[in-house]
Image: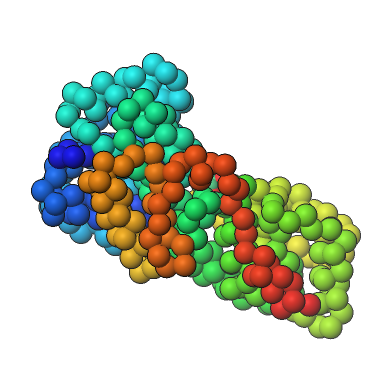
Amino acid sequence: MKKIGVLTSGGDSPGMNAAIRAVVRKAIFHEMEVYGIKNGFQGLMEGNIENMDLGSVGDIIQRGGTILFSARSEEFKTEAGQQRAIEQLKKFGIEGLIVIGGDGSFRGAQKLTDKGFPCIGVPGTIDNDISGTDFTIGFDTSLNTIIQAVDKIRDTATSHERTYIIEVMGRDAGDLALWAGLAGGAESILIPEKKEDFSGILDRLKRGHDRGKKHSIILLAEGVGSGFDYGDRIEKETKLETRVTVLGYIQRGGSPSATDRVLASRLGARAVELLMNEQGGRMVGIQQNILVDHAFDEVFTKDHSINEEMYQLSKELSI
Ligand code: F6P
């Protein structure tokens, strides 16, 4: 394969730029040409495609966001949209495509692969919700952003002796809430993968209050429900003054952590190697610190699961 393309798609995540850099430099190292596609699959259909050289990815390893921009495209989900995309790829002579994004983006990549156009997925999302990889690019940075916020909220929570609910992203996955809850010493962690009895949450809060705790922190994954609804219920039932913070999009921004930069570099480079070996329809990942790759079909059929041992430990440490 002599000419490959790279795009970022779906919600951006810190470290995507480091992955783009790795793809471009690794490919050029192996004497391939690389094309950057702007605005994800939408830009691909529109032919928003540019040649990338070594300099085009200089000074980006430390930057959050994605220099290729990102989008969620409805049109690309249609047969006509996918045909338009393939026409553009042919026009530019591109023979293989690297898609940096999440589950939804890989479904698009699978469609192109099914139509004879090899695509490789690189998991980039803060949600850490993709099976076949222990970690996704951006998760570690996002987690650190959340922890900084939790520590700050903890200060004011203590001053005012309040209960705080901190709602974090993650879509249908609880990884951000679980890891942040454990790292931030939360009293309760509410995640979609585990049904928590509301009375259990109340009991823990009351127990803490009765033994003189000055504050309580609850980490709530957005997939469970609205922090404000939980806040109202808790205040009504416990009479403890309760506040809610929805962290929102600060979780998606910022300079990537060292861990995310290294992960992105390794995964981006491995994706190029797969295309060099004429492979397609696969996602690269990391499991137990070893680079792996799996067929998209496998990734789609297995549900991502949380770390049970960590969940149990979070319960034991918040008695
Ligand atoms: O998938 C990443 C993510 O940030 C989720 O955590 C969140 O639910 C979603 O994207 C928000 O999407 P949008 O940027 O379209 O509002």
Q: Nearer the viewer, residue 135 or 72?
A: 135
Residue 101 x %, y %: 41, 45
Question: Colour scheme used in the picture?
Answer: rainbow
Q: Nearer the viewer, residue 71 or 206?
A: 71
Residue 283 as seen in the image, left or right of residue 189: left
Q: Nearer the viewer, residue 169 or 261?
A: 261
Residue 217 in sight from this viewpoint: no
Residue 115 as seen in the image, left or right of residue 25: right
Establish if 180 lies above or below 220. below
Residue furthest to the top: 80
Quadrant placement of the C terminus: bottom right
Establish if 308 lies above or below 127. below
Residue 243 x %, y %: 71, 61
Establish if 288 lies above or below 221. below
Residue 10 x %, y %: 44, 40
Residue 272 x %, y %: 26, 49
Residue at image position (87%, 69%) is 203
Q: Quadrant of residue 110?
A: top left
* Mark count: 0
Residue 270 as seen in the image, left or right of residue 281: left
Residue 80 as seen in the image, left or right of residue 206: left
Residue at image position (67%, 65%) is 308
Q: Quadrant of residue 176?
A: bottom right
Residue 82 in sight from this viewpoint: yes
Quadrant placement of the N terminus: top left
Residue at image position (81%, 64%) is 201
Establish if 212 lies above or below 127. below
Residue at image position (21%, 25%) is 90
